[in-house]
Amino acid sequence: MARSFKFIALASSVALLSGCSVFYPNWGATSLPEEPEIVSTETAPAETDSAAEPEPTESASQTPAPEESETQKPEPKKTTVEVIMAVVEPELKILTVVAQLPSVSDEGGSCTFRFQAGDFEKKLTVKAEPSATYTQCYPIEVPLSQLRSGAGLVTVSYKSDLYVGTSAATSVDIP
């Protein structure tokens, strides 16, 4: 009896574990499966006149199309850029600006800081870094000695291959 119970338990375990392959058919796979290449099943019509000009094949007529699409880059989408803070820190003698793209996680872009006061303008470009749900510009720190004293406006623009945008102007008062 004990021997038959062991056999039934072992057989049940094997059947149960082999059923896992139904749920995990690619156990241990390191990449997604690739789509099979579709091969055309069309056949070329038989030539009736040997002097007739041959018709171009499907592959010859499609060759120029991929080259055209490779040279044309898609136009970047417009996105929102927010200045989270633009704070004068007199004890450190710097203007600190932090900006982000709240609804876009994008890689490879840069942020350009722009300070304007009358006819004076200062620009500085920094990298941007993606997060899970947004992209943040590296903190922008500009020495106060490089800026004109008085009221000024700060904007931050973002540019990458996929996105562009400019923030609303933020007022700052440089001592």
Image (cartoon, helix red, strand yellow):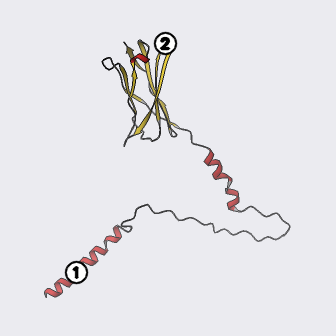
Q: Quadrant of residue 41?
A: bottom right
Left or right: 79 as drawn, with respect to 38 = left
Q: Amino acid at mark 1?
A: Leu
Left or right: 112 as drawn, with respect to 64 = left
Q: Residue 151 has which mark?
A: none
Q: Quadrant of residue 72?
A: top right
Q: 10 Å neighbourhood of mark 1: few (<14), some, or many (≥20)?
A: few
Q: Position of residue 76 (x, y in %)?
A: 53, 38
Does 121 sit above or below residue 134?
above
Q: Position of residue 37 (x, y in %)?
A: 56, 64
At numbered mark 2, what does the secondary structure look like: helix, strand or loop? loop
Q: Amino acid at mark 2?
A: Gly
- Which quadrant is the C terminus positioned in? top left
Does 130 sit above or below residue 39?
above
Front label number (1 vs 2): 2
Q: Residue 118 has which mark?
A: 2
Residue placed at 66% from the left, 52% from the top? Answer: 65
Residue receiving disc 1: 10
Does 126 sit above or below residue 61?
above
